């Protein structure tokens, strides 16, 4: 049973436009969410996080939005750059642990020149 | 300033053999975590270790899998009598202290295990 779902395996976006990656979750106990970025043959790197007490968190070109009632979060990248081409993972956990994360299957973002 | 180092990068084993995956945490980090990623899936937590202690092994299969983090040397994830279903990417992460969300995980580049 997938508790964290990223329904789009891949997404193609023109350079300079906005990329929107989506993530849905089923467990209402999740209260902290993270996005990781992964290049081929490398490990995931932390990108941005959001606590359930917020509905938005922004860091430069990256913004994460959380809709608790819909159990949905999204990552916006604007403007998209070629270096953003990677696999993006959504992850969630309940409690204060930093390692017991439930991961989505990832969305491969391709930025077209 | 070296990051989390994992070796080997690729490992091929025949069914029934043993696989040993090594992880050296970032300098100054004393907490190590192992994750497994099966094809087309997200990462799944396996085990959390500190030096000479297993803190949480709730994600480890009960048989054939073991992990250690000795006082000296890297953390080792050992898989005995490998089967085809063990083929996956195994990632190690480290952090300077345990638990809290303010302590982000730093991942290595992974070991891709292929069982033939």
Image (cartoon, coloured by chain):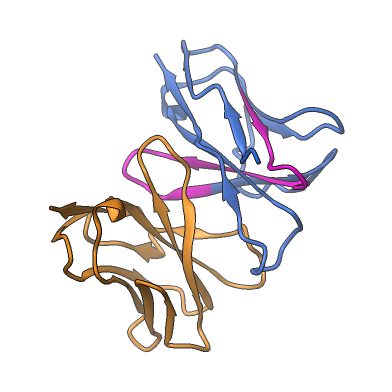
Chain colours: A orange, B blue
Task: Tell me if residue A26 can be seen.
Answer: yes
- Residue A1 is at least partly visible in this image: no
- Report which quarter residue A101 is drawn in: bottom right
Judge whether residue A69 is colored magenta: no
Q: Position of residue A40 (x, y in %)?
A: 35, 38
Left or right placement of residue A92 versus residue A95 in this view: left
- Horizontally, residue B98 falls left or right of residue A109, namely right
Q: Nearer the viewer, residue B36 or A27?
A: B36
Residue drawn at (65%, 50%) of the image: B58
Residue B84 x/y as whole percent: 41, 22
- The relative height of residue B110 versus residue B44 in the rendered view (above or below) is above
Total labels drawn: 0
Q: Residue at x 83, y 41 (%)?
A: B51
In the rendered image, residue B22 lying in the magenta stretch gets the answer yes
| B97 to the left or right of A109 | right
* Magenta range: B21-44
Query: Percent position (x, y) of residue B75?
Result: 72, 32
Q: Quadrant of the N terminus of chain A?
A: bottom left
Residue at horizontal 52%, vertical 20%?
B82
What is the x, y in percent for residue A31?
A: 53, 78
- Using the image, determine if residue B95 lies above or below residue A27: above
Query: Relative to the observer, which residue lies in front, B5 or B112?
Result: B5
Give residue B114's quadrant in the image: top left
Vertical comparison of B22 with A76: above or below: above
């Amino acid at each position: 049973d997938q508790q964290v779902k990223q329904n789009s395996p891949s997404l193609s976006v023109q350079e300079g436009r906005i990329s929107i990656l989506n993530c849905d979750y089923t467990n209402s106990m999740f209260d902290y969410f993270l996005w990781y970025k992964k290049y081929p043959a490398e490990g995931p790197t932390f990108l941005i996080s959001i606590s359930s007490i917020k509905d938005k968190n922004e860091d430069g070109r990256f913004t994460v939005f959380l809709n608790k009632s819909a159990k949905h979060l999204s990552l916006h990248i604007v403007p998209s750059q070629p270096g953003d081409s990677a696999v993006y993972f959504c992850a969630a956990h309940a409690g204060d642990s930093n390692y017991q994360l439930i991961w989505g299957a990832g969305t491969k973002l391709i930025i077209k020149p | 300033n070296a990051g989390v180092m994992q070796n080997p990068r690729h490992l091929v084993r025949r069914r029934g053999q043993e696989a040993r995956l090594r992880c050296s945490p970032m300098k100054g980090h004393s907490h190590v975590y192992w994750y497994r990623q099966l094809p087309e899936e997200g990462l799944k937590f396996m085990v959390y270790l500190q030096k000479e202690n297993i803190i949480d092994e709730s994600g480890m299969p009960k048989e054939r899998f073991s992990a250690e983090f000795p006082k000296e040397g890297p953390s080792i994830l050992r898989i005995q009598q490998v089967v085809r279903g063990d083929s996956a990417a195994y990632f190690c992460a480290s952090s300077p202290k345990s638990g809290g969300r303010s302590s982000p995980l730093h991942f290595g580049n992974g070991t891709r295990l292929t069982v033939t």
